[in-house]
Image (cartoon, helix red, strand yellow):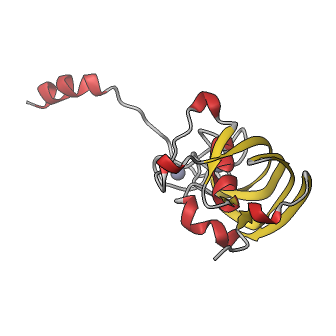
Amino acid sequence: MPTLTNLDLQDIQEARQRVCRTFPGTAFSSQAEGQYGVSDTVTIDLDVRKDGRKFRLVGAFEAQLELGCCRCLEAFSWPVSVDVDLLYLPASDGMGERDVQIEESDLSTAFYHDEQIDLVQLVDEQFQLTLPMKPLCRRDCRGLCAVCGGNRNATECKCVEIWEDPRLDVLRSLLKQ
Ligand SMILES: [Zn+2]
Ligand SMILES: [Zn+2]
């Protein structure tokens, strides 16, 4: 049963067809694995070009994602717009239901099964690729105080962070004896 989150290739009758869809953020919760949240909706705008059994998807995916800052741990909004240009080929019969792993150097080619392309999965993959390694709420995020744990962007605490050279521990224990 084809669902809205799938692109049913049997519906593509023209050589060129525009596919615009809006997905609720909840469609992504199971696939996000805590890596990002979707603030509102995800919109996709694709120009689907059909060439026999080959389908080329050209367009963009847009959303307001929600990421967690790696320094202060606060959630922040991260607008994303991903341009895509992907070629879909039918998975050969020999491959069956087995997942086809695409080499990193060949990300622009993918395979479809049963005349369906899972658009939510595709968008998720594309978003994962654009996520920053170290998300920051702002470039000069001051992070959390190592002493009281307070968010130093919000409040100026009076804690003094003293760093003691661990190599001196041996010396200190000797002095105590
Ligand atoms: Zn931060
Ligand atoms: Zn503090």
Q: Nearer the viewer, residue 46 or 112?
A: 112
Is 50 on the left or on the right of 109, as rendered? Answer: right
Name the quadrant of the N terminus.
Answer: bottom right
Q: Residue furthest left?
A: 177
Q: At 70% from the left edge and 59% from the top edge, which residue is drawn?
A: 119
Up-down relation of residue 15 to residue 7 (above or below): above
Q: Nearer the viewer, residue 108 or 81?
A: 108
x and y percent of residue 11 in the render?
A: 81, 66
Up-down relation of residue 114 to residue 147 (above or below): below
x and y percent of residue 64 in the render?
A: 78, 58
Q: Nearer the viewer, residue 80 or 123?
A: 123
Is 35 on the left or on the right of 136, as rendered? Answer: left
**In this view of the protein, can residue 154 be seen by the observer?**
no
x and y percent of residue 171 in the render?
A: 19, 22
Q: Where on the picture, by quarter, is residue 19?
A: bottom right
Q: Where on the picture, by quarter, is residue 108?
A: top right
Q: Residue furthest bottom?
A: 1
x and y percent of residue 136 in the render?
A: 66, 44
Q: At 66% from the left edge and 73% from the top edge, which residue is drawn?
A: 26
Name the quadrant of the C terminus.
Answer: top left
Is 40 on the left or on the right of 47, as rendered? Answer: left
Q: In this figure, what is the number of numbered marks?
A: 0
**In this view of the protein, can residue 7 be seen by the observer?**
yes
